[in-house]
Image (cartoon, rainbow, N blue to C red):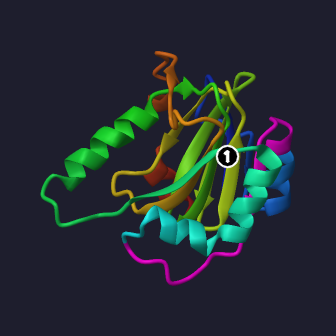
Amino acid sequence: MTLLTVWPDSDQATVLLRTTSPDEVAVELKRLGVRYENWPVVEGISTTPSSEEVLNAYRAQVDRIIDTEGYILVDAMHMTPSNDPDWQTKAAEVRQKFLAEHTHDDDEDRFFARGSGVFYLHVDNRVYGILCEAGDLLSVPANTTHWFDMGTSPDYVSIRFFHDDDGWVANFTGNDIAKNFPTFDELVAGRQK
């Protein structure tokens, strides 16, 4: 279930809003121009799926998004634990890149086919932490300041949508605000209490 937490950007100890209500999440995010949808999860996708396997499993929804939003590059990627002795180091390096606050010249549309991750949007002196789980589609508008945390042991499959062939290109802000807010692991642990 999606969890939305909102803080003032100057005080992560003060929670302005915390909700798992899909309707409340959608209304709050819509105010920011963020599209949020929940799709039925397709079971049976392999542990380390190809992009084609994931896209075919969600073909009707993917085609609808392409038709309505004009995306020209769509793929699926996964971060899945492996027996590779360097996997944890590689995952930590990727995580650090995503944790750095940035913007994109393009919208950032992500659908979680499996697993979860947290998008943190830094808008109007507030931080919106959206814990997305399997079935969640989130569309962060172009030029929205944000960061992403997949946790210390990432295990997810996501579909990515792009308006051009460049794919994921970040414009880093240099702001280290991410270190001041609860991490993916802390949000997940806090939700289970």
Q: Is residue 167 left or right of residue 108?
A: left
**What kind of element bears circle 1?**
strand
**Is residue 87 found inside the magenta-colored segment of the image?**
no
* Residue at 29 percent of width and 39 percent of height: 93
Residue 101 or residue 64, whichever sits in front: 64
84 with respect to 24 (left or right): left
| Farthest top residue in view | 174
Left or right relative to 106: residue 165: left
Q: Is residue 21 above or below residue 167?
A: below
Magenta segment, prevailing SS (helix, strand or loop): loop
Where is residue 2 drawn, in percent x and y? 67, 60
Relative vertical location of residue 7 with respect to residue 55 in this rendering, above or below: above
In x, y percent, where is residue 185?
Answer: 44, 53
The total of numbered circles placed on residues is: 1
Image x and y of residue 147, in percent: 53, 34
Q: Which residues are magenta?
A: 29-47
> In this figure, which residue is indicated by the disc labeled 1?
5
- In the image shown, does 185 or 33 lie closer to the viewer? 33
Q: Is residue 32 magenta?
A: yes
Q: Circle 1: is it few (<14), some (14-19), or many (20+) Cα within 10 Å?
A: some
Q: Amino acid at mark 1?
A: Thr
Residue most extreme to the left? 85
- Left/right placement of residue 130 relative to residue 70 reads left
What residue is rendered at 87% in x and 49% in y? Answer: 27
Give the percent coordinates (x, y) of residue 191.
57, 61
